Image (cartoon, helix red, strand yellow):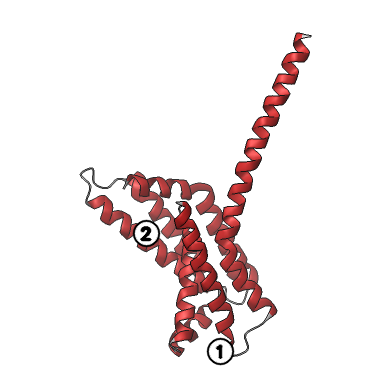
Amino acid sequence: MRPIYYANKALAEGCRLFHIRSILWFKAFAIQLVESAPLLLFLAIIKFVPPLKMSDWQLPYYSSSALAIVCALFMARTGRRANQCFVGIYVYLYIGSLGQIVELHQLNEALGLLAASGMMLSILVTAVAYLAFSMARLGACESGLSFDQIGPHAIFILVSALSFFLSFFSRGNVYLGEIIPFCILFFIYSRFLRQKISTSLVKS
């Protein structure tokens, strides 16, 4: 009877661990879904309501920017560190909305020229801003700067820059100009850099 007892105990423990991991996975997926909601809304609108003239961009920019504000407040409220890639995309949406509000045609034309690479550029600029913020805080500490704290930011900037150039010089190509650069950037950031960057910010 004891083998059966231990087998049942192991099975119960396995089910408990599976349940816990399932909950953690679902929470992580839900957070990623919330973070990506403004981008998904933006892409859905321009897909089903294609902008034919400059004023047609108001609907996708305004609606996705409003949702981005809600998502940013949610992340801040829950104390979670936002994905830098999505923060850069939020900034891009805010800039696009600002261009529509003030009718800054040069900005709108520049965004139209950049196409998907505009988001990549916004992510790159946001990454540089994060690095500058970290260096300013770390520079004020007695311990000073270290590669473990600055390195992940620098690597993310490098990857963002390469993704931007690939996207910019491949405009018009859905795969090389949009899908591949975004997949590379999000994968490297989420898989290798996000935790290290969050840790460096905590240490600072």
Residue type of the residue flagged with mark 2: Tyr
- At a point 50% along the width and 53% down the height, the residue shown is 189
Position of residue 146 relative to residue 69, above or below, is above
In depth, the one of 204 and 148 nearer the eye is 204
Mark identifier at residue 83: none
Q: On the picture, is 149 further left or further right than 46?
A: left
x and y percent of residue 50 in the render?
66, 83
Please give the residue where the numbered disc 1 appears in the rendered image.
Answer: 55
**Residue sitting farthest toward the top:** 1
> Neighbour class for label 2 at 10 Å: few (<14), some, many (≥20)?
some
x and y percent of residue 64 in the render?
56, 72
Quadrant of res 199: top left
At numbered mark 1, what does the secondary structure look like: helix, strand or loop?
A: helix
Q: On the picture, is 79 further left or further right than 140?
A: right
Q: On the picture, is 2 further left or further right than 44?
A: right
How far apart marks 1 and 2 lie (CA) works out to 33 Å
Residue type of the residue flagged with mark 1: Ser
Which tag is nearer the camera, tag 1 or tag 2?
A: 1
Q: Is residue 82 visible?
A: no
**Residue sitting farthest toward the front:** 77
At numbered mark 2, what does the secondary structure look like: helix, strand or loop?
A: helix
> Neighbour class for label 1 at 10 Å: few (<14), some, many (≥20)?
few
Quadrant of res 55: bottom right
Q: Is residue 31 visible?
A: yes
- At a point 46% along the width and 74% down the height, the residue shown is 94
x and y percent of residue 38 in the render?
57, 68
- At a point 67% along the width and 36% down the height, the residue shown is 19
x and y percent of residue 112 in the render?
53, 82
In depth, the one of 57 and 155 nearer the eye is 57
Please give the residue where the numbered disc 2 appears in the rendered image.
Answer: 130
In depth, the one of 181 and 204 nearer the eye is 204
